[in-house]
Image (spheres, helix red, strand yellow):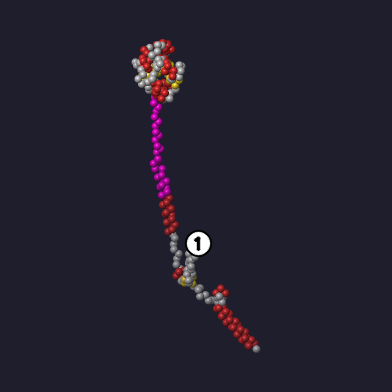
Amino acid sequence: MTRNTWFQALILVIAAAAIAIVANGFAPPQRRLVLPGWYPDALRVPPHVEAAPSGQVVESASRPVETTATIATVAPPTTTLAPIATTTTTAATTTTVATTTTTSPTQPLAHSPTPTPVPAPAPEKTFAPHPDKAYIEVTGDDVAALHAKGALFLDARRTSVYEQGHIAGARSYSVWEADIDDKVSKLFDERSDQESQNKPIVVYCSGGACEDSHMLAQKLWGIQFNNVYVYRDGFPDWQNRGGAVHTGAQP
């Protein structure tokens, strides 16, 4: 009785094992049990795959590559020369920078442009006395300068013309009127000393062919006025220049 029971139990164990093996063979890979001691790919190592850039997919080999003991014993490549090369390059770079820094101050500096010299102003005319000459003819520029200095102006035209317009400050000294000698004598009384007689006096008329100013200048020189100037272009030129003009019998 006992023998039969053990025999039946053994048969059941064998049958169960057989059923389990068959069922495990038909099971999917993720549910299949691997029997102890059976590893068919134990000596197979998958090849090294570089990491794929973002957005790309790298497919692995269809089957793992078998490795041998020779591959495992290969020595890693040496990298001893890399630091030496790096150090040498760094030293060369440093030397170049130092050389550049040393030679930089020796470069010529840009010169600033030479300033343009300012011409000196023309010396101002002094209108010195000329006792050896009865008069000196002058142009509008000199006349304007003498007018600005407050020189005495004498108008040699007729009184009626003078009253229509004359240089501002000028006195009426018409050489064709009877009182001309009295006016000249009166002027001498005003400037009887030598210093006053050396002050500049400007005489003018209508310019051009008009000789009235020259005649008046001769009279003034005859009583020792030694600094007389004749406005050669006369009153018309003064008007064209925009000089100050007065009308009437008063200067």
Residue 164 sits in which quadrant? top left
Q: Is residue 27 magenta?
A: no
Residue pointed to by mark 1: 54
Q: Main secondary structure of the magenta part?
A: loop
Badge 1 local density, few (<14 within 10 Å), some, or many (20+)?
few
Image spot of residue 135 (x, y percent) = 36, 17
Task: Name which residue lies at 59% across and 83% down.
Answer: 15
Task: Name which residue lies at 39% across and 29% down.
Answer: 119
Residue farthest along the bottom direction in this orientation: 1
Image spot of residue 187 (x, y percent) = 42, 13
Image spot of residue 57 (x, y percent) = 49, 65
Relative horizontal placement of residue 209, taking residue 21 as reference (left or right)? left
The amino acid pointed to by label 1 is Ser
Task: Name which residue lies at 43% across and 20% down.
Answer: 165
Please provide the residue range marked out in magenta: 96-123
Q: In this rendering, is residue 236 above or below 179?
A: below
- The quadrant of the rendering that contains the C terminus is top left
Residue farthest along the left direction in this orientation: 132
As helix, strand or loop, the secondary structure at mark 1 comes to: loop
Q: Nearer the viewer, residue 54 or 155?
A: 155
Q: Is residue 110 magenta?
A: yes
Q: Kindly tell me whether residue 150 is visible in this rendering.
A: no
Image spot of residue 183 (x, y percent) = 42, 12
